Image (cartoon, grey):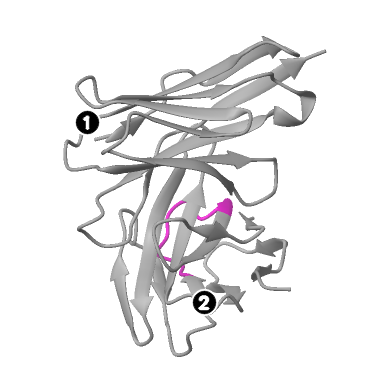
Amino acid sequence: DGGITQSPKYLFRKEGQNVTLSCEQNLNHDAMYWYRQDPGQGLRLIYYSQIVNDFQKGDIAEGYSVSREKKESFPLTVTSAQKNPTAFYLCASSTTYEQFFGPGTRLTVL
Amino acid sequence: DQQVKQNSPSLSVQEGRISILNCDYTNSMFDYFLWYKKYPAEGPTFLISISSIKDKNEDGRFTVFLNKSAKHLSLHIVPSQPGDSAVYFCAATNLQGAQKLVFGQGTRLTINP
């Protein structure tokens, strides 16, 4: 089955620790995206990549980093510089403008 | 600045009636619009889209209307069913630009039996 997987579903980390969220797709999509969802704020774009080995900052990139070494994978690292990391993180991919989303990772920083 | 706005955080509709979800945008460069549906703790799923060259697009029970002069779009669901209870996001983009979507804040739709 083609789709997008994000792991883990729930993640807990202590304040000050970096954490990496996984996103894998087997849809053969060129573009991949990371969003953050907070209550009442919709989806905000963190980073996106339109091609392997290239990525751009979205609207709220501070405190986050990404890599795109393979077409199928777009991991997101939440660094200790991110002031409010507790949120629901969504990964998406696309070939055109219709984006397909993964199931999300709920990150809680204690 | 919020370029895509959904001013109603929530909407409650009786089963079988029409649900109308609204979305406004400010960026006149947007020329393609999408609606997504999201259940709790899941990723959004694509519902329907519309290009700025059209003013209406239908897909089964879902119809999206676009009023370019008012920079307003709406999603109509007829008839509403209990499974339609979810959060609905509208999104917008410019087809000539990068493949990025700008999302609204979402409207939580509750269908009452």
Identify the residue shown where x is 48% and y is 89%. A70
Label 1 marks which chain's residue? B
Q: Which one is nearer the viewer's eye here, A57 or B6?
A: B6
Label 2 marks which chain's residue? A
Q: Secondary structure at mark 1?
A: loop
Q: Residues within 10 Å of mark 2 (few under 14, many from 20)?
A: some
| Residue occupying the far right of the picture | B113
Examine the rendered structure and indicate whether residue A96 appears above or below residue B67. Answer: below
Q: Which mark is residue B59?
A: none
Residue A16 % position (x, y): 52, 67
Identify the residue shown where x is 48% and y is 85%. A71
Residue A65 % position (x, y): 40, 73
Q: How many marks?
A: 2
Q: Which one is nearer the viewer's eye here, A7 or B18?
A: B18
Kind of residue at disc 1? Thr
Name the image quarter holding the N terminus of chain A: bottom right
Q: Secondary structure at mark 2?
A: loop
Q: Which residue is mark 2?
A: A75
Examine the rendered structure and indicate whether residue A62 appears above or below residue B77. Answer: below
Identify the residue shown where x is 46% and y is 29%. B64
Label the magenta part by its dominant secondary structure. loop
What is the distance, in whole Å, between disc 2 and disc 1 at their CAs? 32 Å
Q: Which residues are magenta?
A: A78-88
| Closer to viewer: mark 2 or mark 1 | 1
Q: Which residue is mark 1?
A: B26
In the displayed structure image, the side of residue A23 where residue B56 appears, left or right:
left
